[in-house]
Image (cartoon, rainbow, N blue to C red):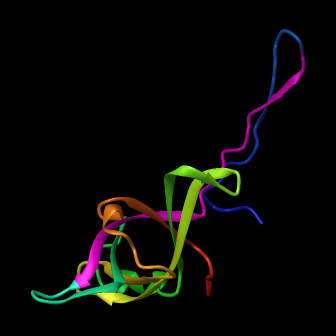
């Protein structure tokens, strides 16, 4: 199955040699970017189990309906190496919209650390109903 965003491979014939040159296919990313805003909170209370995310290109509450149930990955780099890698991932899931401006609530397996506020995360485009 070919994604609509991916470009087909084009073959060009060289005038001098007569050989065909093929352009490499452009890889498409299977995620949307999002910004971590912080924990859900009120004036007095903070709810660290709920993280607020601002999705790129989502401006209304109706637009968030597509992203409900999608998986979220926060990828970051740590100092120490574990399992032969310094990269770590926190996984979560988008639960519901928050307000009317395209912000959503997400629940992560472990609570999001405050050092991640303002950082980017990836909203995977799976699982999908379409």
Residue lying farthest to the right in this orientation: 18
Q: Position of residue 59 (x, y in %)?
A: 29, 73
Residue lying farthest to the top in this orientation: 16
Q: Quadrant of the C terminus?
A: bottom right
Q: Which of 26 and 47 is in front in this view?
A: 47
Q: Position of residue 38 (x, y in %)?
A: 28, 73
Q: Who's the residue at 31% across and 68% down the image? A: 114
**In screen coordinates, is 90 left or right of 7?**
left
Q: Who's the residue at 65% across and 53% down the image? A: 6
Relative to 118, residue 66 above or below: below
Q: Which of 115 and 79 is in front in this view?
A: 79
Relative to 121, residue 44 above or below: below
The magenta segment is 18-40
Q: Where is residue 95 in the image (x, y as percent from the top left)?
A: 43, 89
**In screen coordinates, is 86 left or right of 103?**
right
The quadrant in which residue 31 appears is bottom right
Q: In which quarter of the image is the N terminus?
A: bottom right
**In screen coordinates, is 32 left or right of 83?**
left
Residue lying farthest to the left in this orientation: 43
| Count of labels in the image | 0
The quadrant in which residue 124 appears is bottom right
Q: Who's the residue at 55% across and 65% down the image? A: 89
Q: Nearer the viewer, residue 61 or 88?
A: 88
The quadrant in which residue 55 appears is bottom left
Q: Does the magenta stretch include residue 21?
A: yes
């Amino acid at each position: 199955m070919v994604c609509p965003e991916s470009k087909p491979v084009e073959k060009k014939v060289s005038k001098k040699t007569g050989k065909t040159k093929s352009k490499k296919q452009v890889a498409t990313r299977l995620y949307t970017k999002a910004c971590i805003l912080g924990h859900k909170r009120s004036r007095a209370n903070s709810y660290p189990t709920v993280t607020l995310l601002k999705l790129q290109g989502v401006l209304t509450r109706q637009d968030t309906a597509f992203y409900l149930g999608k998986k979220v990955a926060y990828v970051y780099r740590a100092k120490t190496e574990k399992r032969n890698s310094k990269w770590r991932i926190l996984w979560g899931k988008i639960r519901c919209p928050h307000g009317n401006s395209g912000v959503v609530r997400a629940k992560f397996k472990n609570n999001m650390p405050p050092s991640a506020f303002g950082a980017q995360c990836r909203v995977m485009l799976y699982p999908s109903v379409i």
